[in-house]
Every structure is written in C-alpha cells, then in structure tokens.
Image: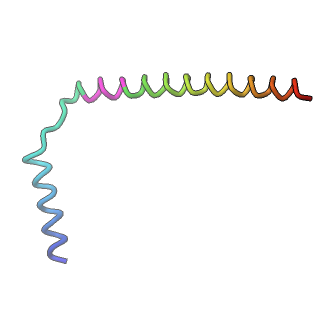
Amino acid sequence: MAGLISYVKDSFEELRNHVTWTPWTEAQRLTVMVAVFSILFSLAIWGVDTVFSRVVEIYFDLLS
C-alpha cells in the first residue's frame, strides 16, 4: 500500500514540476481546430454515405 501512495505522490510532483503545459490560448485554438475538423469530416462521411445509399437503392430498383 505504501508503494501505491508513493507512486501517487511522485506522479503529482511530476505533473507540478516537470510537465510543460500548453499555453491556454494555444489549447483553445487547437480545440477549435479539432472541433471544426471533426464537423467537416462527419459531414463528408454523411455525404458519401448518402450518395452510396442512393446508388444502391437505384441499382436494386433497376433489378426489380
């Protein structure tokens, strides 16, 4: 149990003293970039899915 407590204390000390954190403004900018990219990518996938589903629908309508 003492080893676990020592590990947690060392981990917090590492976070406080040795980790270089991204500046707040850069973190906000990168978050916005990720959100915009995610929205654009999901719209692109939705568009391709819609086109493929219509093509498959037309194909099966022609068969029947």
Q: Which sits in the foreground, 53 or 29? A: 53
Give me the residue at 38% from left, 28% from top: 34
**Observer-nearest of 54 and 42:** 54
| Total numbered labels | 0
The residue that appears at 22% across and 29% down in the rendered structure is 24
Does residue 23 show up magenta in the picture? no
Q: Is residue 31 magenta?
A: yes
Residue 50: image x %, image y %? 68, 24
Q: Which residues are magenta?
A: 27-33
Check the image and report above or below for 49 versus 8: above
Q: Quadrant of residue 58?
A: top right
Residue positioned 74% across, 23% down in the render: 55
Q: Quadrant of residue 6?
A: bottom left
Q: Position of residue 60 (x, y in %)?
A: 84, 29
Q: Quadrant of the C terminus?
A: top right
Main secondary structure of the magenta stretch:
helix
Left or right, residue 6 beside residue 48:
left
